[in-house]
Amino acid sequence: MGPEFDVTGCKVSEELRQEIKSYSPIVKRMFEATQGGGGFVGKTYKDLEYFVDEFGSRLPGSEALEKSIDFMVQQMRGAGLKNVHTENATVPHWER
């Protein structure tokens, strides 16, 4: 039921290996909620479909990006998440 963490082939410290394994119960709960018959079955993909259709391309500095960020902040706060905030990011200027 759900993904297992197999870090045997990873070149990481034992401390990090144990930390990754410690997330297993949380990942299993998330997997069950979204794939295994929980209340979110299919909702994740429908939400993603809406987001992509509504906001389309979200290029740096674009109005679509700003609106999509505002939307996601509102969604997360509406879901009861705490300390939801945005941060400024410097994006290089590209020219063709």
Image (cartoon, rainbow, N blue to C red):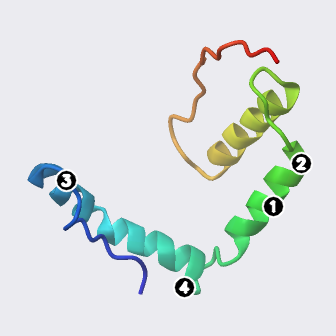
The residue lying furthest to the front in this view is 96
User: Which residue sits at x=65%, y=78%?
Assistant: 41
Mark 2: which amino acid? Glu
Calculate the distance from the C-alpha at mark 3 to the C-alpha at mark 1.
36 Å
Q: Is residue 53 above or below residue 25?
A: above
Calculate the distance from the C-alpha at mark 1 to the C-alpha at mark 4.
20 Å
Where is residue 10, by image quadrant?
A: bottom left
User: Which residue sits at x=71%, y=70%?
Assistant: 43
Q: Position of residue 89 (x, y in %)?
A: 60, 18
Calculate the distance from the C-alpha at mark 4 to the C-alpha at mark 2.
28 Å
Q: Which residue is mark 3?
A: 11
Q: Which residue is mark 1?
A: 49
Judge the density around disc 1: few (<14), some (14-19), many (≥20) Cα neighbours within 10 Å. Answer: few
Mark 1: which amino acid? Glu
Q: Is residue 23 above or below residue 71?
A: below
Earlier in the chain: of badge 4 and badge 2, it is 4
- Residues under numbered marks 4 and 2 in contact, where contact means CB atoms less than 8 Å apart: no
User: Which residue sits at x=72%, y=12%?
Assistant: 93
Q: Which residue is mark 2?
A: 54
Q: Which residue is mark 4?
A: 36
Q: Secondary structure at mark 3?
A: loop
Calculate the distance from the C-alpha at mark 3 to the C-alpha at mark 2.
41 Å
Calculate the distance from the C-alpha at mark 3 to the C-alpha at mark 4.
31 Å
Earlier in the chain: of badge 1 and badge 4, it is 4
Mark 3: which amino acid? Lys
Q: Secondary structure at mark 4?
A: loop
Mark 4: which amino acid? Gly
Q: Is residue 29 above or below residue 93?
A: below
Viewer-side label of 3, 1: 3
38 or 6: nearer the viewer: 6
